[in-house]
Amino acid sequence: MKKLLLLRHGNASLPDSGIADYDRPLNSRGKKEISNIAYKLLEKKLIPDIIIASAAERALSSADIVRNIIKISDNDKSLLRETETLYSASIPEYIDILKSQKETISTILIIAHNPAISSFGSRMTGKHIGMGTGNLCLLELGIEKWSEIKINSPVLISTLLKP
């Protein structure tokens, strides 16, 4: 069984603040949202083997907060993978990213953006998954290898956690 954690980045500065959307930082509310979710990950012993994050500023900042709280070392850069693809990924691109992961990895945390991350969670579960900022969706998948993942992979458990 593989576990997939889908996390929408925390709340960011307003789009009209003169900063390109890609570069918008987390605001104080967003930092608090992500801190709260990271502590819930610790409490539930949901520690990812890797974090795959959008390369946008607010997603990378969210990843850094999670890493610091759950004590993933800065020295092991291979535990955080950033990709521009997740900034505006399609559902097939999410699947491709997951299929390319090592089979020894049990739990993956993806940090990305709406509407794509909610759409992906909804397609995987077959039910509406509305993810506000800082929301995390846990999917326990009935697959043994990441290479087996597809849209209709069996989802044994899905849980939505809010900050």
Image (cartoon, grey):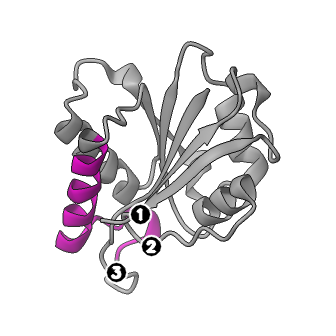
Amino acid type for the residue under numbered disc 2: Gly
Q: In this view of the protein, can residue 90 be seen by the observer?
A: no
On screen, residue 25 above or below 89: below
In the picture, the disc for residue 18 is: 3
Say whether marks 3 and 2 touch (CB < 8 Å). no
In the picture, the disc for residue 132 is: 2
Residue labelled with disc 1:
135
Q: In this view of the protein, can residue 11 be seen by the observer?
A: yes
Q: Which residue is drawn at 63% across and 57% down?
A: 121
Q: Which residue is drawn at 40% across and 70% down?
A: 133
Q: In this view, does 59 lie to the left or right of 34?
A: right
Helix, strand, or loop for circle 2? loop
Residue extending farthest to the front is 156
On screen, residue 46 above or below 32: above
Amino acid type for the residue under numbered disc 3: Gly
Give the extent of the magenta segment: 19-41
